Image: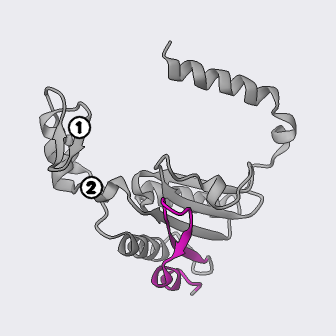
């Protein structure tokens, strides 16, 4: 058993031993909102948004992008579980800014092993074979955080399954200060229509 696995199972034992009344939390989020954000380990929505278990839905993916699956989760969050406000929160210094679709396609076509990043860019760190399947995925890379938040809020707002009376807010989380910085253009694009 790996050390990480042992640590996780030990932590879970401790957590379960003090679970208390959390078993009584209702399925719908108590504060009736959802956050779409990045999977980056430096970003903890519970901390920067003041969340406790049961408060909100947090949907995480690479970049916090409004992919089809993220929108699917948001629509379920609203339609079946009563969220009434959504936040799209990207962050500074995001790994999604370090490559393009073409870079990822090239890396995957030569090897499926982990790649490394150095001063001259991304490089494969292991032998092949690779796969051409990566070229069929839009990796939703990011060139500019403010622009990507705006794009995602607009994509969500204009999706045919998203009601117009649901506000969508756009922010960038600063990984150096812990502050949420509003993207006013995104919040304006996500206003109730």
Q: Is residue 174 magenta?
A: yes
Sequence-first disc among 1 and 2: 2
The picture places residue 103, in percent across and down from the top left corner, at 17, 51
Q: Quadrant of residue 9?
A: top right
The span picked out in magenta is 167-192
Q: Residue 154 versus residue 104: which sits nearer the camera?
A: 104
Q: Is residue 184 magenta?
A: yes
Residue in view at x 38 percent, y 74 percent? 151
Residue linked to disc 1:
115
Instruction: Judge from the rendering whether residue 46 lies leftward or rightward of residue 2; answer left or right.
Output: right
The picture places residue 119, in percent across and down from the top left corner, at 18, 50
Tag 2, which secondary structure? loop
The picture places residue 2, in percent across and down from the top left corner, at 48, 16
Task: Kindly report the distance in space between the C-alpha atoms of the residues bearing marks 1 and 2.
Answer: 12 Å
The picture places residue 101, in percent across and down from the top left corner, at 21, 55
Residue linked to disc 2:
98
Residue in view at x 70 percent, y 59 percent? 50
Residue in view at x 67 percent, y 64 percent? 33
Q: Is residue 132 shown to the viewer in this render?
A: no
């Amino acid at each position: 058993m790996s050390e990480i696995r042992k640590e996780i199972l030990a932590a879970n034992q401790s957590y379960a031993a003090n679970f208390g009344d959390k078993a009584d939390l209702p399925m719908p989020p108590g504060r009736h909102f959802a956050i779409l954000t990045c999977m980056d380990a430096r970003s903890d929505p519970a901390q920067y948004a003041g969340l406790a278990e049961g408060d909100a839905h947090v949907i995480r993916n690479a970049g916090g992008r409004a992919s089809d699956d993220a929108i699917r989760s948001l629509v379920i969050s609203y339609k079946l579980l009563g969220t009434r406000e959504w936040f799209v929160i990207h962050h500074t210094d995001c790994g999604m800014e370090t490559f393009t679709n073409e870079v990822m396609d090239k890396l995957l076509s030569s090897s499926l092993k982990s790649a490394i990043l150095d001063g001259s860019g991304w490089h494969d760190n292991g032998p092949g074979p690779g796969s051409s399947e990566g070229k069929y995925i839009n990796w939703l890379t990011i060139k500019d955080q403010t622009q990507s938040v705006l794009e995602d809020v607009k994509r969500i707002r204009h999706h045919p399954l998203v009601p117009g009376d649901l506000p969508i807010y756009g922010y960038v989380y600063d990984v150096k200060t812990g502050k949420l910085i509003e993207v006013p253009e995104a919040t304006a694009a996500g206003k109730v229509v």
